[in-house]
Amino acid sequence: MNTKKRKNKTVRIIAAVLVLLLASAAFSFLTTPFSKNYYVEPTSSGKKQIALTFDDGPGKYTEQLLDGLRERNIKASFFLMGRKVEKRQKIVKTMYDDGHLVGVHTWSHIDFFKSSKEEIHGELDRTNDLIESITGERPKFFRPPYGHYLGSQLNRIDQIAVLWSDTPRDWVHIDEDYICNYLVKHAKDGDIILLHDTKDATVPAVLKAIDILSEQGFEFVRVDELLCRNGDKLAPGLAYRFCPYDSRAWYI
């Protein structure tokens, strides 16, 4: 009897160890995309450069933002949703003509973790086709919604993935003063800031922060200019500039 109990106990221990190993492997698989094997930071320089990036547009505040950026001679980067582009094509043309980077944020903000290869490529291709028909240039850059992606997915996409290094979380903190103060307090060279031109508090906050930071010697550039400022070459299959993995990435 004791021998049988010992065998049963041994089997339970082995089973528990196997469960732990499988759980560890699954966790590693999910978090690997956020490791440095899959993202690249911009080369440091003696400059104080920041790239402002805007997701989920174009929206009803985008034109106001474009006017403010034009007045200040500032270039930014926009990652657009195809279904919104379809409704505001003139704004997208103005955005492109003003010299901003026009990138893709899928057609309907799908989660790559929950989507098939066919769904992902369909959403990207449909949005790329529409933007190209408006601007005459096919987008070279995209941002996966929520910052979710797998390395195997990036390898199949013939565009450059751009993520971010910091964000005031303007989809949560919908307050002009908070957003402005956050941007000013946390500004540093090489930052790619995630923002949303679909939020009414974001536009005035960003313009105010630009004025303050410009006086402090900061320069605002397109994200491709920031990433290539020292002659670096960008390539599909990598995600550029993602903050070290933390829970914030899951809620954007």
Image (cartoon, grey):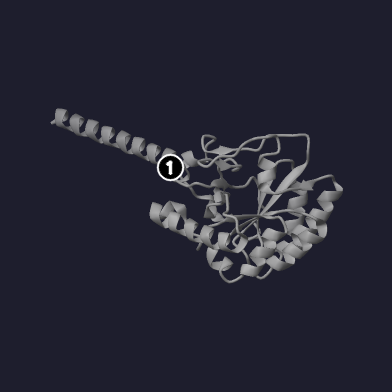
| Quadrant assignment for the C terminus | bottom right
Residue under the image location 67 percent in, 39 percent down? 228
- The image position of residue 41, as x and y in percent, is 62, 38
Which kind of residue does numbered mark 1 sit on?
Ser
Relative to 44, is 202 above or below? below
Pointer 1: what residue? Answer: 152
* Residue projecting furthest to the right: 215
Residue 54 seen anywhere in this rendered image of the structure: yes
Q: Is residue 215 left or right of residue 108?
A: right
Q: Is residue 98 left or right of residue 41?
A: right
Relative to 63, is 112 above or below? above
* Residue projecting furthest to the top: 3
- The image position of residue 145, as x and y in percent, is 53, 55
Residue under the image location 86 percent in, 49 percent down? 215
Relative to 238, is 212 above or below? below
Residue 116 seen anywhere in this rendered image of the structure: no
- The image position of residue 58, as x and y in percent, is 62, 65
